Image (cartoon, helix red, strand yellow):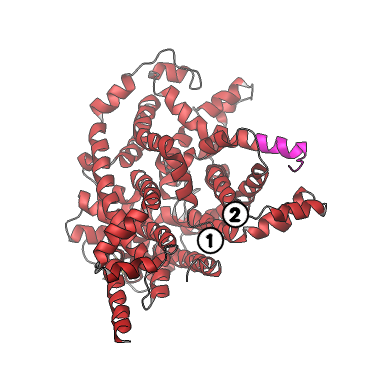
Amino acid sequence: MIKRNNSARIFTYLFLGIITFVSIYPLYFAFISSFKNLAEYTQSNTAFPASMNLENYAYVFRNMEFSRFILNSIITVTTGMVLYIIICNAAGFALGLLRFRFKLSIFSFILFFQIFPQMVIAAQVFRICSKIGLMNSYIGLVLVWTAYFAPFGTYIMSTYYATIPRSMIESARIDGAGVFRQLFSIMMPMATPMIGTIGIVGSLAMWTELPFSLLLISEPAKRPLSLGIAIMKGEHGIPVPVLSAAILVSAAIPLILYFIFQKTIHMGSTAGAVKG
Amino acid sequence: MLKKRLMKHQEERDALILLLPLILLMLVFTVYPVLANFYYSMTKWKGFGTAEWVGLKNYATLLQDVKFWHSLKNLSVLIAYIPAGVFLPLLIAAILRDGLKGWTFFRSVIYLPNILGYVILGTLFSILLSQRGPLIELLTMLGVQDANRINILGQSNSAIHMVSLLFVILMKMGFGCIYFLAAMSSIDSSMYDAAGIDGANWWQRFWNITVPSISFSIQFFVVLSFIEVFARMYSFIYTLTYGGPGFATFTLEFGIYRQGFKAFKMGYASSWAVVLFFFCSAIAALQIYVIRKGDQLQ
């Protein structure tokens, strides 16, 4: 269509090449390292492994309670997701479609308080959780995660609900549907694609979350996966091949999700950013 | 008339019920914690036990703390990388928009870092860039003299620049491209055709059509970049450099962790948190301004 000059093309390919390399190489490196033994790794850490040796994976599962960590992550992230989706939809429905006083102020309030980093609130969250017995508890982690990640999901859902015609709720009211029936039987079924989007973006955020789990979970048996990895990295003397195996185990589920739901994930990460 | 007023009343009640769970969770786990920092920043407190009132003493200490000034200096280095971190993906997206072979492959791949999360990325890059890591091995193979003396993350003058390059530019590049392409897909292509007739070259079209058309998305992306730098870097620093060497890669976020949860000076850490609160508030206000100006709120 439009003629591009060659230098622009070379620049683009060069840059894309660099980014592609930076994006893939860490994972590739973890992959090849995870099959090496320590001697082989020390000899050369860029070479391809001599054999597909699964010892490191066996070690990770046998000695490091990794199956326990995986279970912890699955329990907390799925519970968190159910709560997160209900809360984001309820609030997003109200902010996107309903009319009420102080709407703009409430919206700004939610946007304002979603920005603060975990560390700004960490000390007090820590104090509150130890006061009400939510330390080392799945419930505590789930509540804190949901409070922290739901404002963003709410914002995305509200932009979606704002596109639904108001006549939908008016006719629902005439049929005598209460607010919960409006939400669960009318609104949420219509919003399924967007719910899928915030669900995946939100569960990835929880799956890879570190600061809150680091501070709220001190019992090793309750650690989620990302905390397991971070702590392992801090312990000296963990050989790189073992660490690599642990990283691949931890990344497996998000990667599988990514290959299945790529489009949804791309859409979710750019949602709310494109005007309209 | 009466029925209409009743409906309105009903709608207010519905909205309140729907918003209550979110508001309650936020009040307990976000709003109260953010505001309570102001009180605790004026106390001597270990994070447990009682807090003892000390007035503004923590702030006086803060102003003389070399770690604090290091953190601010590091944040300014990170910010200095933001223009490149915004411009490069914008430029690449504009070039890709004209069509490029194999683009869908690139798109899948360059988004990968976002899936892995900062814990894994920080851990992997700390290995890759270490003195016994693959990068040094590669340099040695290429015949670089004394390559094993190079310690990018272990030297204070290079560490923060490496962190900035990785965090602000390289790891955000994939997201940026996808983000800007999504924004560009809504530009009316007849504008380009008209410019083509007028004989505008590629750069003129880039600056006069593409950039102004997606100015909302660009502004939003700039704000997002600031949020990432001030408020979302903790896990990456924790696993990549742990704030070191010395305080060379300290940020305010990471400083709070080290002061509060490692040295148990939680009162003092709260004064760091208050400073970070003001930075984040400014960014949040900017974000709300951009969103409102872009008509995203009614």
A128 lies left or right of B133: left
Residues shaded magenta: A1-13
- Residue labelled with disc 1: A276
Q: Residue at x 55, y 46 (%)?
A: B178
Chain containing the residue with disc 1: A
Question: In front here: B241 or A96?
Answer: A96
Q: Residue furthest left?
A: A133
Q: Residue at x 24, y 32 (%)?
A: A67
Amino acid of disc 2: Ser
Q: Quadrant of residue A225?
A: top left
Q: Up-down: is A54 above or below B208?
A: above
In contact (CB < 8 Å): disc 2 and disc 1: yes
Q: Residue at x 21, y 49 (%)?
A: A138
Whole-Å distance between the Cαs marked 2 and 1? 9 Å
Does residue B151 appear in this view?
no
Question: In front here: B79 or A188?
Answer: A188
Q: Quadrant of residue B173?
A: top right
- The label shown at residue B28 is none
Chain containing the residue with disc 2: B
Amino acid of disc 1: Gly
- Local packing at callout 1 (Cα closer than 10 Å; few below 14, some 14-19, many 20+) is few
Residue B88 in the image, given as x and y percentages of width and height: 64, 47
Q: Secondary structure at mark 2?
A: loop
Q: Up-down: is A7 above or below A147?
A: above
Question: In front here: B253 or A192?
Answer: A192
Q: Secondary structure at mark 1?
A: loop
- Local packing at callout 2 (Cα closer than 10 Å; few below 14, some 14-19, many 20+) is few
- Residue labelled with disc 2: B186
Does residue A131 appear in this view?
yes
